[in-house]
Amino acid sequence: MATFLTDLFTSIFTPGPTPSLLLATNVSFAALQTVLLVLLILTYSVHFIVLSGICAGLWWSINWFAVELEIAKKEAKEREAKQIEQAQRQRHGSSPDDSDTETEGSRDNDPAIIPPAPKSNTALLPDAGEGELHKRRSLGSSTGELSTDSEWDKVEEADTQK
């Protein structure tokens, strides 16, 4: 029991679902479902049926997500192993295709290789009109004020004229 609690505490700081964390989650949801069933029997309230449904959906989704994460980890490990195997084959010169061309294994289709950005200095050049001052367009009234104080002044003036 003490080792389970220490495993549970350390699993909080470990990324991904750990077996002790999943066990604690499943036990907690089972206890919650039991409590909701007992409350339903004691009170005959429909609310506990709804809460039990919500609890069951959340319980199922957490377990589904944990399974999907494990599947994704396995697929990532398999892809990584294939990439390492291909890199070793290319390093040793034996390719599975055994063709005479060097460019047959195109690097354009490899998603892991990012092509370099085009070297264009036109975006960094200053405009020809450097040093000239331009007035910014106003988002407010025609006077260029962005404050609503002038609007309140107009409302007060309209009230005093009535």
Image (tube, helix red, strand yellow):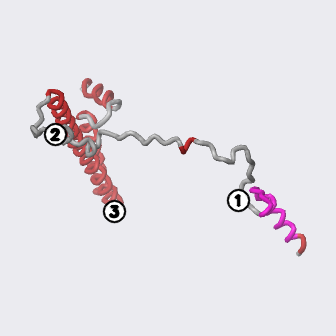
Q: Position of residue 19 (x, y in %)?
A: 23, 34
Residue 137 visible in the picture: yes
* Amino acid beneath label 3: Val
Amino acid marked by disc 1: Leu
Q: CA distance from mark 3 to mark 1?
A: 55 Å
* Residue stretch in magenta: 142-159
**Residue at the disc numbered 1:** 139
The answer to which of marks 3 and 1 sits earlier in the sequence is: 3
Examine the image and state in which quarter residue 44 appears.
Answer: bottom left
Rendered location of residue 51, percent (x, y) = 34, 56
Q: Is residue 102 left or right of residue 157?
A: left
**Residue farthest bottom in this picture:** 162
Residue at (72, 43) in percent of width and height: 131
Determine which of the numbered discs, if any, sits on residue 101 in the image.
Answer: 2
Q: Residue at x 28, y 40 (%)?
A: 25
Residue of label 3: 46
Residue 89 x/y as whole percent = 14, 31
